[in-house]
Image (cartoon, rainbow, N blue to C red):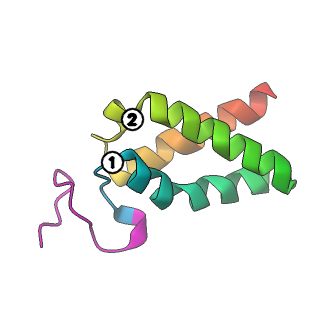
Amino acid sequence: PNTSYGSPRFLRGKRNVMCEDWEQFSRVHRRTVYAAALAATAEPSAAEDLTQETLLRASRHFAQIARATPPAQRGWLLRTLRNLHIDR
């Protein structure tokens, strides 16, 4: 199997998945975003709201994000989550 970051194929380990489409991307990253949101808010409902808003913003920029490496994708998501949390 091709394991280069330039390939849209799955890489080893769930944290290093190149995503081919939005549905796959959101499935791969939702748990990470929610965990970070819950750590930031300590409230499940607020964490879910932040998760949804973060993924909504990611969907708007998905064409750009999809070309990034998995660590860069997570970084984008977590930075966006942090900014949304600060703006609340």
Kindly identify which numbered label has been placed on residue 62: 2
Q: Residue type at mark 1?
A: Asp
37 left or right of 5 in image: right
Give the prevailing secondary structure in the magenta stretch.
loop
Please tell me how crowded label 1 is: few (under 14), some (14-19), or many (20+) other residues with Cα within 10 Å: few
Q: Residue at x 57, y 35 (%)?
A: 56
Identify the residue at image location x=39%, y=56%.
24
Identify the secondary structure beneath mark 1.
loop
Residue 62 vertical position relative to residue 39 in the rendered view, above or below: above
Q: Nearer the viewer, residue 59 or 83?
A: 59
Residue 7, picture quadrant = bottom left
**Which residues are drawn in magenta?**
1-15
Assign the N terminus to one quadrant of the image.
Answer: bottom left
Q: Which residue does the numbered mark 1 point to in the structure image?
A: 21
Residue displayed at 29% across by 74% down: 12
Determine whether label 2 and label 1 are within 8 Å by CB.
no
